[in-house]
Amino acid sequence: MYLPVPSQPDCASAWREAVRAVDALRDHEAYNVILDIDDPTAASTIAHPGVAAVNGFLTDRAKPIDTVANTIFPTSLYLRHGAPAFFDVFNERVLPKVRRGGRWSGYYFERMIAYQGTAGAPPNQLWDIVERMNDDSVRALNKFELSLFDPIRDVDNSVYGGQCLSFMSFKIVPGSPRKVTLTAQYRNHYYVEKLLGNLIGLGRLMAFVARETGLEVGPLTVVSTHAKIDQPGGATRGEIKALLAQFDQAIAPLAA
């Protein structure tokens, strides 16, 4: 049981085609939806008219796209402080303000750089991946895994709450230039409220890894083990359809 979405060139078009595919199904939900994005750093800011349309819709009902993207990778913090210094800045200045309790801050980035599932000092999985990619003695090009699901903190009776991004796998693809690819798995995925921000955040994460390792950004693959066309902020089905029509109208000049 799976639903492959045709490969797309950028984040915005991937969002639209994924929403189109899932929305057409019974109950507007699907299992094991597979997305592939050739350049996940393209069409990834509100300067893109399609992204701006979705952002305007979400700002009034849920969280803006950049807020969602920042839970995966805080680009502005990285650009301001550099790596690895921005890890400490995040832990000392950002995390205390956003933490909702001991179980979940809402930031996937927290688990990437301070995973609490092991004894002792929590490992910085993300920086460890960067350092191993830069280590010439590391021969394996397919052992750069990053876990986000925590069986101690995340198993509860909530239907959809808590973390949804569960696992990520980076790969170095040989060639000229060498590229870094990423496969991300979601246990549950709200396609209206979260998907576009998630794709943009994952693209920014890949750009960080590429910049710190001298690689090029390659394709992003996302597997949504459960996907739903949600109705954020109580939006009606009619308002969702109007958003999709607005998106199509906004990007029409780009295709001309």
Image (tube, rainbow, N blue to C red):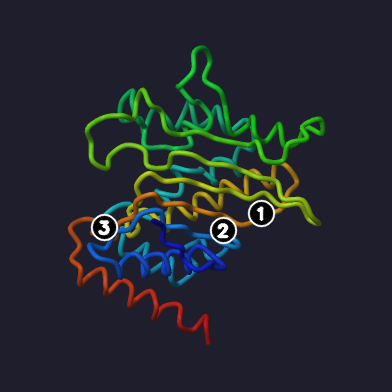
| Residue on which the image places disc 1 | 217
User: Is there CB contact under 8 Å for labels 2 and 1?
Assistant: yes
Going by the image, does 90 lie left or right of 22? Answer: right
Q: Circle 3: is it few (<14), some (14-19), or many (20+) Cα within 10 Å?
A: many
Q: Residue 73 got which mark?
A: none
Q: Residue at x 63, y 32 (%)?
A: 127
Q: Circle 1: is it few (<14), some (14-19), or many (20+) Cα within 10 Å?
A: many
Residue 118: x percent and y percent? 49, 18
Q: Which of 1/95 is in front? A: 1
Q: Is residue 151 above or below residue 177?
A: above
Going by the image, does 126 lie left or right of 69? Answer: right
Question: CA gap, disc 3 to disc 2?
Answer: 23 Å
Q: Is residue 37 above or below residue 124?
A: below
Q: Which of 165/71 is in front? A: 165
Going by the image, does 234 lie left or right of 170? Answer: left
| Residue on which the image places disc 3 | 230
Q: Circle 2: is it few (<14), some (14-19), or many (20+) Cα within 10 Å?
A: many
| Amino acid type shown at disc 3 | Asp
Q: Residue 40 got which mark?
A: 2
| Amino acid type shown at disc 2 | Pro
Q: Residue furthest front?
A: 1
Residue 33: x percent and y percent? 41, 57
Image quadrant in which you'd find residue 155: top left
Q: Is residue 4 above or below residue 217?
A: below
Q: How many marks?
A: 3
Lower sequence index among marks 1 and 3:
1
Question: CA gap, disc 2 to disc 1?
Answer: 8 Å
Q: Secondary structure at mark 1?
A: strand
Q: Secondary structure at mark 3?
A: loop
Residue 64: x percent and y percent? 36, 55
Residue 46: x percent and y percent? 46, 64
